[in-house]
Amino acid sequence: MTRYSELRAELASLTTEAFRPELAEIDRLPTEDIARLMNGEDQTVPSAVAAQLPAIAAAIDATAERMARGGRLVYAGAGTAGRLGVLDASECPPTFNTDPSQVVGLIAGGPTAVVTSVEGAEDSRDLAAEDLDALKLTPDDTVVGVSASGRTPYALGAVEHARAQGALTIGLSCNADSPLAAAADHGLEVVVGPELLTGSTRLKAGTAQKLVLNMISTITMIRLGKTYGNLMVDVRASNAKLHARSHRIVALATDATDAQIEKALTAADGEVKTAILMLLADVTAERADQLLTEAEGHLRTALAVGDCSAGAGRVGTAEPTAPGAPVPPRHPGAGRP
């Protein structure tokens, strides 16, 4: 049996590669019928993710614990899986004001592979090890290998090498009993079943991977204090839309006037979290920064500090909150500190 015969047999055994004879005439269907079929297929993905929620939550808690100590979150994958990791990593700085080195997306073949196929790159375990060595991994780092099949050498190599270096490892795949999940500390197997187009794992498998990566990055950032309730208080205002969003977030959190918000954001050098603390606690930008540093960036913790509670009543009201009382939330659903 040739190498390709062996690989063909291996692929044929994977759920993500299964052929669906009932769809063999799909190219003859009207466009709307095909669209309806695809939509129906996509609706099965959330339930597949739901089945893995306990495992996903455990992986996130372990990741957040390490990132709180200064660790990094690193995604590693090839093709669609790699591009999804790069996408998720690239959205963290503007959304959560993270340093670009804090969440990293590695794709087999390097940045060129984001837009152009780099032949053979996904087949190299050694390439994954080289890419990770360039980052100088530490035990506080987390490496997430992403592969629909759960057998891609680049993703497998990344997880195996990272684990050998003492880093936390997560293996995200869309097949049960995958080598990737077995190689990782946390195996996440979101089994979405065969694709509409045989083997086209950018479809349901890609959607499932995107949903899980959304959870990993977003919930980790929530655990790290990058949000206040469901407000993105660490958003980085790099364009007109984000400047407007910064103002709106401060308004939702404080009920302050436009003039108060503008003054606070200016004094806070555009830092939304600092501006909110200034307004709610009636402190200077310098004091707000100090409180946030002491609270390791958690706005709720900073607000709960005793000397912040005094005078931290609702902005624009005559009655401040009594000294020592907990600071009430300034937007629906925020809960108490």
Image: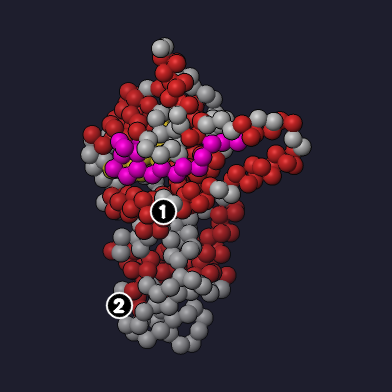
- The answer to whether 334 is drawn above or below residue 309 in the figure is above
In the rendered image, residue 116, in percent from the top left (x then y), is placed at: 54, 25
- Magenta region, residue range: 180-197
Residue topped by disc 2: 306
Q: Image quadrant of residue 161? A: top left
Whichever of callouts 2 and 1 sits on the residue coming sooner in the sequence is 1
Residue topped by disc 1: 53
Q: Image quadrant of residue 156? A: top left
Q: Image quadrant of residue 4? A: top left
- The answer to whether 329 is drawn above or below residue 230 in the figure is below
Query: Residue at (26%, 40%) from the top-left corner?
Result: 167
SS at badge 1: helix
Say whether residue 111 is visible: no
Query: Residue at (37%, 22%) from the top-left corner?
Result: 124
Residue 74 colored in magenta in the image: no
Depth check: give the residue in front, 208 or 272. Answer: 208
Q: How many marks?
A: 2
Residue at the extreme front of the image, as rendered = 21
Identify residue type, mark 1. Answer: Leu
Residue at the extreme right of the image, as rendered = 30
Identify residue type, mark 2. Answer: Gly
Is 143 left, or right, of 149 in this rendering? left
Depth check: give the residue in front, 215 or 204. Answer: 204
